[in-house]
Image (cartoon, rainbow, N blue to C red):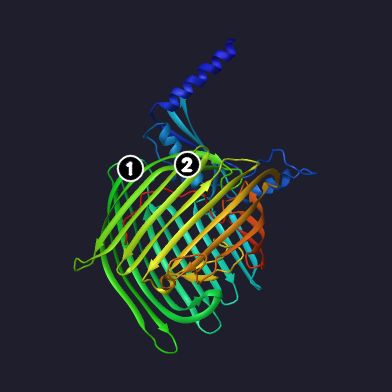
Amino acid sequence: MNKTAQILLLSTLSLSILYAEAQRVDFIEYRVLNVFEENGEYWGPYDYRWVYSVLNDLHLPSRPATVKRFLAFGIGDTINAEIISESERRLRATDFIGEAEIQIQRCDSGNVAVVTVTDLWTTKLAPSLAYKGRVLEWSLEVEEVNLAGIGVNIRGAFEHDEDYDSWLFGAQLPRMLPGGASFKFFHSNETKTVGPTSTSLSVSKGLRRDTDKLIYSAGAFRAGGVLPTWSDGNTRGESYRIDDETQYFGAKYLFTPKFGLGLGMRSARLSREIEADDATPCFEQEYDIIAIGASYLRRNYIADRDVDAFGRTEDLPLGWLVAAESGVSGDFELNYNSASLAHSSFVGENYFATKIYYHKICNTESLGGSLRFSSAMFLSGRLCGRIAYQSVNNGFPETLYRVGGQSVLRSYRSYAQVGERTAYGNLEWRIFTPLEIFSVRFGGAVFVDAGTAWDRADGDLSLKHSPKPLLGDVGLELRLGSTSSTTGQIARVAVARAFDGTWELSLSAGQMFETYFGFEHGVPIP
């Protein structure tokens, strides 16, 4: 072995030992790389590097203080490989950082944590155009996920269909002062009456550093307006007026990173007045609930690529999350129970994630579960799918489940079927290609969707005797995913044929479903 090889080997061993052992951080250095690599090799008959230089000049980079908020350590902390990996995952989990790497370097003054992140293009323009059931629907959403480089998210959207025009405005301030805050305003109308308007404001704090033991959430919500109910085939039924107010607060203390115990409180007033020709029954519900809850989280991660987005590292959670909550009203009547179980693991090279839940508050009861999976790569793609079941008893009209729309059945409108029970599934082969132009990577999907909704009065679900038919479609999608912009930037052009023979053409943005769940301790709020 020559001298150069010996030096390289010794340097590698020293770095490995330093990375494995716990080290005190005396300084932190932040390096924020441009969105686009101006000196890279780009496909095309001409040199397009000047385009990337202009876009880099237009982009406001993430500020060091913004990056600092997502680290699991600070100056003076003792860190190890686990804390470094957790910090890198938190940075990648944002919508404005694509890749993150943290290295410990020694200098004369001590240990320096060098945090290197690659920014993403964070201004998102998401148009959607769909022709379904001989009806044209369209929407436009504009979102900036890293305003001025400080991590603030602002969003505005407009949606038009046959019956409604809807507006939405929202803002989020993640991990700030010292937690996070969010605001959302929604309004829609139709030709005869003013539709529902809702406003919500919440503040919360999650785990930011390994020394944080307390997480909390608090907020308020107000909703009012007239909302039509719907029957199958998207025909309008009765309408009802909603008038809701609710306030909540909850906190959980983590005795260990795996186990937490918490307390939550909620005060709510809900009212529904059904406007029908024969009667106008009124449904009202008021409650004040104090709840306690516990959760157990056992989690680790594996990094992978080409799971849901295009060309970036994604962190798949592995492990278990078990949570249980229970609460009483002011007169000590037990009127709130909730439990959930989530698990994800690899079976061979195939990833599976499952979740089941039960929730009951006053007389409203819901139960559901889902299974998602992603296969190993084959033929430049992955086989991804999900199956889900949900049910609700004694719920308000808007708690009924709707089968249809881009998130469930791509060839149907959102209210194709409505019921107290729903079951659906999606299966698609997601194709990833190496073809990339202007940081836009080309891919596609071959898919099949199926689902149905029904009521308790219909009896047990049977494909042979079900009073509501099984809906479904098969189709093809062209997907354009930006490797240098926020994760929502996946444009989809799809053509699909429903089981009944009708065709649908759509242009939309975003992923229809992810193949994994996030595992986090929750705050026990009824």
| Badge nearest the viewer, 2 or 1 | 1
Q: Is residue 67 visible?
A: no
Numbered disc 2: secondary structure: helix
48 sits to left or right of 209: right
| Callout 1: SS | loop
Q: Residue at x 47, y 82 (%)?
A: 238
Residue 63 falls left or right of residue 523: right
Disc 1 target residue: 258
Q: Amino acid at mark 1?
A: Lys
Q: Nearer the viewer, residue 341 or 306?
A: 341
Q: Which residue is mark 2?
A: 89
| Badge 1: residue crowd in 10 Å (few <14, some 14–19, many ≥20) | few
Q: Quadrant of the N terminus?
A: top right
Residue placed most toward the observer, 419 or 279: 419
State whether residue 442 appears in this view.
Answer: yes
In this rendering, is residue 243 above or below 392? below
How crowded is the residue under tag 2: few (<14 C-alpha within 10 Å), some, or many (20+)?
Answer: many
Q: Position of residue 153 (x, y in %)?
A: 50, 57
Residue type (three-letter) at the residue carrying disc 2:
Arg
Give the total number of marks visible in the rendering: 2
Against 429, is 130 above or below? below
Q: Is residue 127 above or below residue 48?
A: below
Whichever of callouts 2 and 1 sits on the residue coming sooner in the sequence is 2
Q: Is 62 positioned to the left or the right of 54 in the image? A: left
Name the quarter where the C terminus is drawn: bottom left
